[in-house]
Image (cartoon, grey):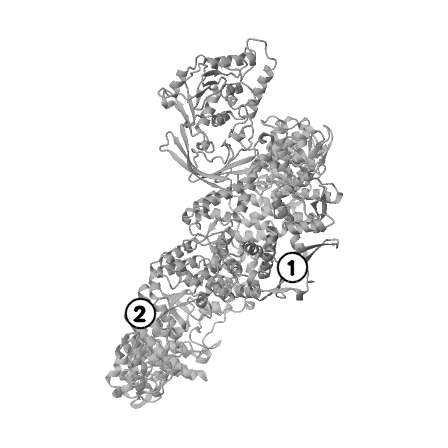
Amino acid sequence: MEAAREHIEEIRKTKFSIGGEQNPLTEDLHQAVKNLSAELYAKDVHFLMELIQNAEDNDYLEGVNPTLEFVITSEDITATGAPATLLIFNNEKGFSSKNIDSICSVGRSTKKGSRKRGYIGEKGIGFKSVFLVSAQPYIFSNGYQIQFNEEPCPDCNLGYIVPKWVEENPTLSDIKEIYGSGTTLPTTTIVLPLKLDKVKPVKQQLSAVHPEVLLFLTKIKRLSVREHNKDPSLNTVSAIAITSETNFEVRKNIDAVSYTLHLSADEKGKGSDRECSYYMWKQRFPVRHENKVEKRMEVEEWVITLAFPYAERLHRGMSSSPGIYAFLPTEMFTNFPFIIQADFLLSSSRESILLDNKWNQGILDCVPTAFINAFLSLVKTSENAPVSSLAPMFRFIPINSPSYPELNIVRESIKAKLLEESILPSESYTQQKIFHQPHEVGRLMPAFWTILEKARKQEVSLVHLSSHGKYILSSSFDQTEYDDILNFLGVELVNNEWYAKCIQSSKLVEGVSEDLYLDLLLFIADNWKSKFYHTNIKNIPLIKYVGLYGDVSLCSINESMLSNRDKVVSLSRQYEHISWLIDWNKEFKCPANYFFLPKSTQESIQFMYKRETVLGWLQDHVKVGSMNVYEYAVHLNNCLTSCQKRAIAFVHFLYHSLRKKYLAQGDVGYLCGSMPLVDNYGDLKRQRNGVLVPANGSKWVGLIGSNPWRGEGYVQLAEDYLQPGYFAGEYSSKVLLLEFLKTHVGASDIPDISPPNAAIPTVSSLLTKQNAFLLLGWIRNLKQRGIHIPVKFLRCIKEGSWLKITTSGCPGNRPPSQSFMLSSSLGNILQNGSVLVDIPLVNLSFYGDNIKEYKEELKTIGVMSEFGEACEFIGERLMSLTKYSTLTREQVFSVLNFIRFLRQKILPLDKFINSIKDKKWLQTCCGDRSPVGSVLYDQEWRTASQISNIPFIDQEYFGVEILSFREELKSLGVVIGFGESYQLVVDNLKSPSRLTSLTASAVLLILECMRRRGSSNKLVEALRGVKGFKTNLGYKSPGECFLYDSQWVCVLQVFEDFPLIDHKFYGTSIFTYRNELKQTGVKVDFEDAVKEFSNRFKQQASYMTKENVLSFLLCCRQLKNTHVFPPDLKNYIREGKWLQTRHGRKRPSECILFGPDWQSICPITDLPFIDSDNCYGKDIHEYKKELKSMGVVVEFKDGAKFVAAGLLSPLDPTCITPANVFSLLECIRILLKDKNYSFPDAFFKNISQKWLKTTNGYRPPHECLLFDSNENPSWGSYLKRTDGPFIDEDFYGSNITLYKKELQEIGVTIDFKEGCSLIANHLDAKKELKAIVRVYNYLSQFNWEPDVKLAKWIWIPNGKQDGKWVSPSKCVLHDKDGLFSSELKVLEKYYEQKLLNFFSRAFGVRCNPSVDHYCKLWEGWQCSGYQLSHDDCRKFWGYVLKHWSEKTEKTLTDKLVKLPVASGSDEILLFSKDDVFIADDLQLKDLFEQFSPQPIFVWYPQPSLPSLPQTKLLEIYRKIGVRTISESVEKEESSSVDVAQLNEVNPKEFLIKKDLVMLILGFLADPVMKMEAERRHETIQRLLNDTFLETVEPITVNYSLSLSSGEIVKATASRMIRWDREASKFFTQKLDRSSGFKNLIEYATYFSEAISEGVLWENNDHIGALTELIKLAFMLEFNEEAVLFLMKSKNLQIFLEDKEFLASAFPSD
């Protein structure tokens, strides 16, 4: 310890001159240290990373487990007054004297220049960063006990680096008590008494120490953080102990090492330890010269380590973990699923790496290669690992876009490399793992994988799964959880046709269980519309059905669903009907090719998952029907067209289905009614109206004879229905079947059958007694059943003479309709009292008393039995006489006497009277009339005869004798006496022309008739056109008249032409007929009168006189409390233009009654005042209340709206005083209080004139602003009054601000947040930069954007008071490349960043030049002959690459005419795009560089840059139209060789060997080639059939390249091989194997190219791949084992047919 103390004293004395003269450099050194510490570390807590970094760089004794511990305590062991103390313990070797010297200096780290030795620190002030959190740090190590202070030492005026020996506070015992008294202190302890404001940040950072901090540290194996307080409850730091352990099973590969590292974190309070293992891949890469930097000049290679976490990363509750380490974690979260560690150059704050630094870019360029090597090692090195264990490894692929755009190049490069590697395993169903490139494999839908797995378990062979055009991705990988990864790799689902091929080529239909078969159908159904509808799956055998002979067969979907389909497949709708339907379908021989799904299939469907989906798909898309027994029966019924046996069998089917209750009674009834029946001729009859039992033994034959129903569609059943038989294993007996036919088909006989609608010939003559009773019984049965008897049938029964009768004792036969069944006494009475009329009676002696039981049936067929009917019979006989002449006087009296006779005998009269009373046989004054309506005249009819033509009985013709039959006439309907015969008067009313000059009594009679009869349209119509009412204006028609009413007669006196009925002429009784008068059209009510008045008022409103208006106003006053005008009149009074104003006739609501209140607003308005001066006079003011009630404005507050509408236009602003303005604003205030009021458009038009005075002159309101300085914040917070058109308060006074709401309503902008547009519109008038910036800041504050993007909005200053306005399109914010100083205005030169953001948002100023700008720049270079530099090209094409898109491609293609080429003098020239080429063929490149007089190959940077890779740039050239040299050159092979001098050789001996052919066959058999065996063999056979000729001299090849100028560049080369495929000749130079490897590989190259081009001349895309295979095999001398291994490695194989072809082609091998 003494030596240490002496060392410290020596430093203080010699270095810092303590005790001697003051060092003149101490102040500068102090400031340098202070500035460096504050500048490099922006965050307080980065000192932790520096301390960890120092601990990693320390040296440790062998056997020591390097440990770093952080302990924070609230105890002030330093006695400095610190609120907390942080102690850092490290078990390193300890500080040496050199370390002490270094820490007491600036920039003298002992680790400088030692990157090769594994040191990770480099800044030289790592320890000094502790001053950010502690003013007095302490170090205890190897006997040293020193303290530093950030304050200048009083002895040397220097801080930070002046050591001071520590005697006490703290002592080692103090430290040990904190560390733990039972353990030995580590070698080195740092004590940091924390600053007051740093305690919380330090605790937060300690709590956030990342668990992965040890991941890339090679020395430190344990790191811990804890808090020490006497009261543990006060602890706030989250304690953690992190341990690192390495699995030393290291695998070396290339220049790489891989191993497994385990991290565990014991976080206090979190329970058990958390662990994670990481697969570590460390690979070395040589540092490229172009990436060298000064800080790393001594480093020759990069060591890049990638860490792949096997489980969830240790993140300690953090949302994300660092993705980039520079030995210690940065704060860069890459979004990659792996961690990148390398010797990156960091920013000063250690937050991130410097992405634009070329050293770091070189490292990042190597990361994709390291990743690919690591990934392949993970995936392919575990030979025994199952494929399923590999899938999680693919989570390490960086599928998500990185957080930093610069890292996207890494991601895209990894992706590009992955796409070229065979990394994805296919599903082979064998033990062999086979890997493929991502584009070679395809995915399957998850549901199909489930089907395949079940099929595999059912021993279905799936080895050909990858034989349908795509290798199928392993099922372990083809999972939803890997979707994002597979999408990233471009792995797509197989095309939909693949499934059809797979199902067809395997036994997935007939070789699996019913459950799996239904799973397959469910899979197809779920994906039908989206996947399979348009595929060949419709045509493969897929649908099961029971065939014609009961076997299970298959049909395609198309066969089932097409409209002309050959097969119709169905299933049973009900489970219990399945067997029944299948058996009967077999019985009927599958009519119309209807088939059912097998029983087992249907049963499985009933219990399957998602059965509704499968059933719906089968029904909707496969057209598989679902039937129950009834529906099947309907189908059978439809198929019964010609086969008698099927029709008979169908009846048996219905019978048994009903018996088994498979069909309901109603369904059977329907089917029986529609099915075809076999008639007695053997024909099938479907249409029928009834069914007859067979004729043999039937009753209908005995009564009728022939079949009269045939014409009515009745079917007579055939005898075949009576035959018993077996059908579908079921037996039917004759009796039961006949009963079924009668019950359900309706087969019937008399009396149960309905009669035909036809005449029965047997009733034309007398029927036998038996048939007569059979007929009557039939009718009785029909009546009982309620069956309608057909008209023709009933007519022939009624009119046929088959009924035996007697007349006055004489027998005969008559129709029933002319016969009676009366008692003999009643007949005698009728004979004696009437004229001689014979009455035919039914012959009871013939029929017996039984006939009386059929009284109702006889009545139905027309037989009469009532007395009244007999009387009616007599009456009709009498009335029949009137057909040819009227009744004579004697006959009339005879009828009257007969009526008197019946009355005397007290016999019913109704039937007789009713039969004659309506007939016209009675003579009257109006001609022959019926008794009904005729009148027997007397004096009571005298008045009525004046107005009506009454039909009085002609007493002159009949004489006075007729008066003795008053009662008989009355019974016939003749009117006797006037009584209530008002209707008769109305019915016989005279014509209107004969109703003129009516007396008062006649008018009153007419009105009485109307009253008695309720109302009479006939009377109303008769009186309507007759001017029969006397009025004050003469006789008028009813519709013109008014009934006088004193209460409202004033309405009719406003105008003098309303006719009033003369009530004095008619007497007061006229008022009792108000209703009747109203019916005739007379206006009797106020409502009717006022309606007429309303019409008159509307007609005369536009020219009403002063008297009319004043009279009307007086009337309104009189009727105010008694009568109300109707709404339409009220409305017209308000809306009609009848009041005269200064503006002409106006509606009341448009008028103003002038008063003194209106005087102030008149000068600036034109208002419609009522014309009291020239028209109405002063009297009009007496009716102020009436006018107001009509809508006239009589008060100023109610007329503000007129001000808005009557504002004068144009307004002369110079004549408008402030008083006028305030008056107008007051009106606006009144109107704004009315929430329902809207200002008219004219108001806004007039108000939009320039009349408001502003600081910028007179402006319309919408262009004005109100500068209210009383608000806070206000306009004054942003602008000055002169910055915009603010209202001139000096002119209007401060009271103008009291009308803010009113001003805002007319368009003035009040809110300072809304004035942007107005302020902006005046921007172009300004020239002062300060004012313009002030306006810009205001506009920016409120996110203003202009309406027109093309205006010149940007001020480009030229000094403080000069400049110019330019368009935003001419500006950019930045010019990173510095290429556009003369093309665009770069705004960062003139404005601060805040305004740059505003210019971008508001004016659309681009942040940087666009692609179009760059193209325009290039066009300028093209035209101007500008001498391009390499730097210009790098910047231009670097920008293009960074912003590449389809739009960029199109722009460059269209605009770039010339492209750069590099000349030999290191100059860059621009040549036509058509004359520059991409050197995709190096041989051609070398050749044409020799022969071309000018450079022709496009420029690219050399060496290639990470930001501008050569491959990317060449791809851009290609896309914008640059051709490759290989596709542009035309080749002509020399044919000057004398074929006769060539040696013909056997190719099988040294060229076309069996193993070569096997290799080619394997390549052609690859599914990607889509080449069938026959084509493969034809291709090889053509090769074998060719003639092979050998020459010693090489074959000359001529090349030519055409330029756009027409010039042709020619070049000559030689080749060793040529295949003239069309001539079937193969020319080859003799191979000399002893001439070296170059000659050998050259020959192999030309040979493989010739063979590949000849074999694949129709498929150029695969020539390269085959060329490389043949070349490699050639170099291996086509060794069989080597070729077989080569084929296996490329997943190539030949099939049995290929082996047979090989054997035949090479029989001796």
Q: Which mark is residue 35?
A: none
- Identity of the residue drawn at 59% across and 51% down: 1637
Residue behind mark 1: 1592
Q: Residues within 10 Å of mark 2 (few under 14, many from 20)?
A: few
Which mark, residue 665?
A: 2
| The one of 488 and 1635 positioned closer to us in this rendering | 1635
In the image shown, does 1363 or 837 lie closer to the viewer?
1363
Q: Is residue 1125 visible?
A: yes
Q: Quadrant of residue 577?
A: bottom left
Location of the N terminus by quadrant is top left
Answer left or right for 159 relative to 1538: left
The reply to whether callout 1 and callout 2 are in contact (CB within 8 Å) is no
Q: Quadrant of residue 556?
A: bottom left
In percent of width and height, residue 1275 lies at 62, 29
Q: Could you say whether the residue bearing mark 2 is in a helix, strand or loop?
A: helix
Q: Nearer the viewer, mark 1 or mark 2?
A: 1
* Residue projecting furthest to the front: 1634
Q: Is residue 934 left or right of residue 1524?
A: left
| Amino acid type indicated by mark 2 | Gln
Question: Where is residue 166 shown, x and y percent of the image?
Answer: 46, 13
Q: Is residue 1137 visible?
A: no
Q: Amino acid at mark 1?
A: Val
Front residue of 519/276: it is 276
First in sequence, mark 1 or 2: give its number: 2
Q: Is residue 1199 above or below residue 1634?
A: above
Residues under labels 1 and 2: Cα distance? 102 Å
